[in-house]
Image: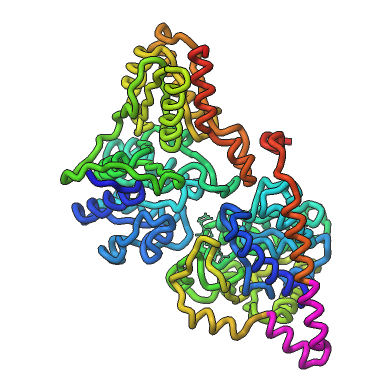
């Protein structure tokens, strides 16, 4: 095992895939000469040159489109959005083009492309730079959606995403780039898309968390264990689409209680979908209504105190667990 | 005008200082080196005219009349800020001052500014709209879509491209197939002009011509104003993509020094006058710091207000 930051784990995945397949190339704003706005592509331009690592103008719709066309014509682009906030400008290409291409061409044209970058809030970057957009992209058939929460997952899932023959939405989190974790050193380590991971085993309450809320949920679980001797199981779906509902339901059948912690807003969220699916298949196993922790229903404020109040937190997750466990 | 430029410079220097102390969070894009553009263009406006700009908005906000206290308190995320601490560095607004905001999505405000001009024409209000953006924003589709509509519908808008040569770490040469941005307006048969952005009087003169065209003929203009930003793209950018020599070369034609020298040569400004301007700017900045420090954080009840009216 190697101890890597999520940033470096992603960097390794990109390097290995660039080496493995000459049709893989990286394209986006500041990915090459600047080494990436958040340094995920550090060193890659120097190593692979301007053909494989390509700086673009600030023209999200345009370079996403170049990626889609290139993928249809046989390349395997990794398109970086400096942040997912800016993907909204390119959403026409992602939703109307990439997601629909295979279907509307009657199965003739697949689009093997990865769109990646940081999703969700950062540090006080305010209303237009703090969107968690997974619910929007998850709503469209034709896209896979991946959200890693550890260095190992980041590496293993990104490699799988690049090899996948479908358009993959790969969402990182800026607050997490510096977090370290053990990454297997085996040659060609990958993690399949669509398989959840139990990040902590427990018996009394299931917490489903993804991306930024995974470390929060683990801390909350620790606290609850200490304070109330209640044992929480933390399940990280890792891939939102396809969703490994079986692992989640399996956990709920064991604990009979479910808290979902997510960074996006709650209305029409991925958590809402998970709550529905659990209700649909495991209603009789629930001993309490499902509880969700999300970002409040307001754009992200700038002020430090308001931003903290808007976001999910360890305390909020603890409160939710207490509620479903009637503590 | 000289005072506005000096105030802008000193204010941004203070921002850098307090940012490093952790008083300001998030992104913070400074305007140092570009003062002549906001000052020259906006001081040619009537107070009722409208302005919209990007995230590099502190100085534009102040030139439009927002108190430095309210701008700095916003940067501190305090309730006394011009948007109650909700927006921060990138999102200064003031309805009272016809300041339609700082915007964080590169190019977004070009379309919004076009809509503001649409409303002015619709209402026959006689207002002119100034719409600021960087040269990298010109590569977004919204720029081209907006220019087409503005000329097609004869809207009273002035597009001011602040060409500081870099969009973050990417030089214009590496991102744009042509050099001449003003000439892009020719493709839409729109009036356009290239302006030296280090010369505040040249900016003012060009702005006056465009303003007259907008007000009297209801026609748009594209101004490409060439300038330079001395600092990194934002406070988190070390700026390794430029050489010290390059920065020094532009600093030789510093807009404040140039204007000061020309006023002194024309004998309308004495040494003492300039000292007085510096003193006044320093005092204003100190007042703003005191206000921002003392203003409270917004109450948590503000979190869910202003989502919808
Ligand atoms: C749509 C979008 N893409 C990317 C960014 C990130 N970003 C912010 S400013 C900037 C550079 C813009 O340069 P320019 O338009 O020349 O303006 P300047 O910063 O020089 O004033 C970039 C890439 C963004 N905010 N919005």
Chain part drawn in magenta: B256-280
Q: Is residue B184 above or below residue B256?
A: above
* Residue A262 inside the magenta-drawn segment: no
Q: Is residue B260 above or below residue B190?
A: below
Q: Is residue B82 visible?
A: no
Q: Is residue B125 visible?
A: yes
Residue located 37% across and 22% down the image: A233
Comparing A147 with B137, the one in front is A147
Residue located 51% across and 46% down the image: A122
The quadrant in which the N terminus of chain B is found is bottom right
Q: Is residue A54 above or below residue B302?
A: below
Q: Residue furthest left?
A: A187
Q: Residue furthest front?
A: A226
* Residue B257 inside the magenta-drawn segment: yes
Q: Position of residue B25 (x, y in %)?
A: 59, 52
Q: Position of residue A135 (x, y in %)?
A: 47, 33
Q: Position of residue B14 (x, y in %)?
A: 66, 65
Q: Quadrant of residue B120?
A: bottom right
Magenta span dominant secondary structure: helix
Q: Is residue A1 above or below residue B222?
A: above
């Amino acid at each position: 095992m190697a101890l890597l930051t999520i940033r470096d784990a992603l960097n390794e995945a990109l390097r290995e895939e660039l080496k493995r397949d000459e049709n893989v190339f990286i394209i986006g704003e500041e990915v090459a000469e600047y080494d990436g706005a958040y340094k995920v592509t550090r060193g890659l331009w120097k190593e692979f040159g301007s053909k494989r690592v390509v700086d673009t103008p600030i023209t999200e719709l345009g370079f996403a489109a170049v990626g889609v066309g290139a993928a249809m014509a046989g390349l395997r682009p990794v398109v970086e959005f400096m942040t997912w906030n800016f993907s909204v400008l390119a959403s026409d290409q992602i939703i109307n083009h990439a997601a629909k291409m295979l279907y509307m061409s009657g199965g003739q044209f697949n689009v093997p492309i990865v769109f990646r970058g940081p999703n969700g809030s950062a540090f006080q970057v305010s209303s237009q730079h703090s969107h968690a957009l997974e619910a929007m992209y998850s709503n469209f058939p034709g896209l896979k959606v991946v959200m890693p929460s550890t260095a190992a997952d980041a590496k293993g899932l990104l490699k799988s995403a690049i090899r996948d023959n479908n358009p993959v939405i790969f969402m990182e989190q800026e607050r997490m780039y510096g977090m370290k974790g053990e990454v297997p050193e085996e040659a060609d380590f990958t993690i399949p898309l669509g398989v959840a991971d139990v990040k902590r085993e427990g018996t009394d309450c299931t917490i489903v968390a993804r991306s930024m809320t995974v470390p929060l949920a683990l801390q909350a679980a620790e606290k609850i264990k200490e304070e109330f001797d209640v044992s929480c199981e933390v399940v990280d779906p890792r891939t939102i689409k396809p969703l490994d509902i079986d692992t989640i339901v399996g956990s709920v059948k064991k604990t009979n209680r479910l808290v979902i912690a997510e960074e996006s807003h709650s209305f029409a969220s991925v958590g809402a979908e998970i709550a529905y699916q659990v209700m649909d298949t495991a209603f009789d196993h629930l001993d309490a209504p499902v509880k969700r922790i999300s970002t409040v229903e307001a754009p992200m404020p700038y002020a430090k105190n308001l931003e903290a109040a808007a976001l999910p937190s360890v305390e909020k997750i603890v409160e939710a667990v207490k509620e479903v466990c009637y503590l | 005008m000289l005072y506005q430029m000096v105030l802008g410079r000193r204010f941004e220097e203070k921002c850098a200082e307090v940012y490093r102390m952790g008083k300001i969070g998030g992104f913070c894009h400074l305007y140092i080196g570009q003062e002549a553009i906001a000052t020259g263009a906006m001081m040619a406006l009537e107070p009722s005219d409208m302005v919209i700009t990007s995230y590099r908005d502190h100085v534009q906000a102040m030139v439009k009349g927002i108190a430095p206290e309210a701008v700095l308190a916003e940067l501190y995320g305090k309730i006394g800020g011009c948007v109650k601490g909700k927006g921060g560095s990138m999102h200064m607004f003031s309805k009272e001052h016809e300041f339609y905001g700082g915007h964080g999505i590169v190019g977004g405000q070009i379309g919004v500014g076009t809509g503001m001009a649409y409303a002015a024409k619709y209402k026959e209000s006689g207002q002119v709209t100034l719409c600021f953006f960087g040269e990298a924003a010109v590569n977004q589709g919204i720029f081209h879509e907006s220019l087409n509509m503005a000329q097609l519908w004869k809207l009273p808008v002035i597009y001011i491209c602040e060409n500081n040569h870099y969009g973050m770490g990417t030089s214009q040469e590496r991102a744009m197939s042509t050099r001449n941005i003003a000439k892009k307006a020719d493709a839409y048969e729109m009036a356009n002009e290239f302006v030296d952005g280090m010369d505040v009087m040249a900016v003012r003169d060009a702005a006056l011509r465009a303003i007259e065209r907008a007000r009297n003929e209801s026609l748009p203009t594209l101004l490409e104003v060439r300038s330079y930003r001395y600092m990194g793209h934002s406070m988190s950018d070390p700026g390794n993509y430029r050489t010290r020599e390059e920065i020094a070369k532009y600093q030789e034609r510093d807009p404040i020094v140039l204007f000061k020298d020309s006023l002194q040569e024309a004998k309308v400004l004495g040494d003492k006058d300039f000292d007085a301007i510096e003193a006044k700017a320093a005092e204003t900045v100190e007042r703003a710091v005191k206000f921002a420090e003392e203003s409270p954080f917004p109450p948590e009840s503000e979190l869910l207000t202003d989502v919808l009216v």
